[in-house]
């Protein structure tokens, strides 16, 4: 379902992932979503009679940066990340000790600027702090992060809880929404980007749980939009298949699904009818998907970059 304000150039399908061709010179905004699977290692080596996992997160981040650069080398874009690694000790671009969001931003800068460009990437690690006076106050990362490529700049960031997963996943881990208020450095356009990771799939009650989280996302987006902004964009791991009518229909009342990874990693754009105070229109000039499998880096075969997820992306032209 594509709303009128999200037009598709011929050959740019939201349903059929494509590679980029040289024709797309008018791209103003690149949007990506990627679940980096921080808790998993997909490389193994044999130690005596046993096979043991090899830490591969840094390798996978490098391979992702190379794949994104091949898709669209002109700009880094806006990248919503889920399941980021909190404590890296082997980031290939110093400092070695950092979190996955900051490390990935430096890797992207190194990769994209290797050909003489001067692009910058600003990391935004999602963090949440309980209000003062809350029993057992807790401050820390929420597993979400974003990288903002130039010329886009971060004006502000907020994160808040929108739901709770069921017990068998992390003891009922809290689900969060990350909000970035952004401004284009030269054209002055303003945009709100949301990044999330909804509750895991399961029975009908889990569908209802995700519907509640989706309603919280829609409420936040509609209540926090500013007059004169571009239409808001929501990316993330939605944990429901894109044609799951129970959850997709709930999201589609206020947003249009522009692209997905074939399953549950989605890119949604707000509908004009739901955000009448916004300006401009997006034209999707290209769509692409970075597949999880089939990558080789430094002679090492990487069977899975992002586990059972793929990474969708869209190149938009913006008309005001």
Image (spheres, helix red, strand yellow):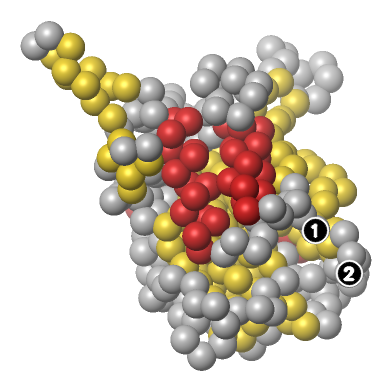
| Residue 220 locus on image (x, y percent) | 73, 54
Residue 250 is labelled as none
Please say if 212 is above or below 52.
below
Residue 187 is labelled as 2
Q: Nearer the viewer, residue 202 or 16?
A: 16
Q: Secondary structure at mark 2?
A: loop
Q: Nearer the viewer, residue 240 or 266?
A: 266
- Decide if residue 4 is on the left or right side of residue 85: right
Q: Residue at x 28, y 22 (%)?
A: 53
Residue count near mark 1 (Cα–Cα under 10 Å), binned few <14, some 14–19, many ≥20: some
Which residue lies under the disc numbered 1? 151
- Decide if residue 51 is on the left or right side of residue 179: left
Q: Residue at x 43, y 24 (%)?
A: 171
- N-terminal of the pair, mark 2 or mark 1, is 1
Residue count near mark 2 (Cα–Cα under 10 Å), binned few <14, some 14–19, many ≥20: few
Q: Secondary structure at mark 1?
A: loop
Q: State how far apart marks 2 and 1 are (Cα).
A: 9 Å
Q: Residue at x 66, y 49 (%)?
A: 113
Mark 2 touching mark 1, by CB under 8 A? yes
Q: Residue at x 60, y 71 (%)?
A: 315
Is residue 177 at least partly visible in the picture? no
């Amino acid at each position: 379902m594509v709303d009128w304000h999200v037009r598709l150039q011929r050959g740019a399908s939201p349903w059929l992932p494509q590679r980029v061709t040289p024709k797309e010179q008018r791209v103003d905004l690149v949007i990506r979503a990627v679940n980096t699977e921080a808790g998993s290692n997909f490389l193994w080596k044999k130690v005596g009679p046993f096979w043991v996992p090899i830490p591969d997160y840094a390798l996978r981040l490098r391979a992702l940066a190379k794949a994104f650069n091949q898709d669209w080398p002109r700009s880094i874009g806006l990248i919503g990340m889920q399941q980021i690694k909190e404590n890296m000790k082997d980031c290939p671009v110093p400092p070695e000790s950092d979190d996955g969001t900051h490390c990935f931003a430096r890797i992207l800068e190194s990769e994209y600027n290797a050909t003489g460009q001067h692009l910058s990437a600003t990391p935004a690690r999602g963090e949440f702090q309980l209000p003062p006076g809350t029993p057992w106050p807790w401050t820390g990362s929420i597993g979400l992060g974003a990288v903002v490529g130039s010329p886009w700049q971060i004006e502000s960031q907020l994160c808040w809880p929108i739901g709770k997963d069921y017990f068998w996943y992390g003891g009922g881990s809290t689900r969060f929404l990350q909000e970035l208020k952004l401004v284009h450095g030269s054209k002055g356009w303003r945009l709100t980007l949301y990044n999330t990771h909804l509750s895991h799939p399961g029975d009908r009650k889990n569908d209802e749980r995700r519907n509640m989280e989706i309603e919280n996302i829609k409420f936040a987006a509609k209540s926090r939009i500013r007059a004169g902004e571009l239409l808001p964009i929501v990316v993330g791991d939605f944990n429901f298949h894109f044609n799951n009518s129970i959850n997709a229909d709930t999201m589609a009342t206020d947003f249009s699904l522009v692209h997905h990874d074939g399953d549950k990693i989605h890119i949604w754009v707000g509908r004009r009818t739901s955000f009448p105070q916004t300006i401009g229109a997006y034209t999707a000039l290209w769509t692409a998907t970075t597949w999880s499998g089939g990558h080789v880096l430094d002679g090492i075969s990487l069977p899975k970059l992002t586990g059972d997820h793929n990474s969708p992306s869209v190149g938009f032209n913006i008309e005001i």
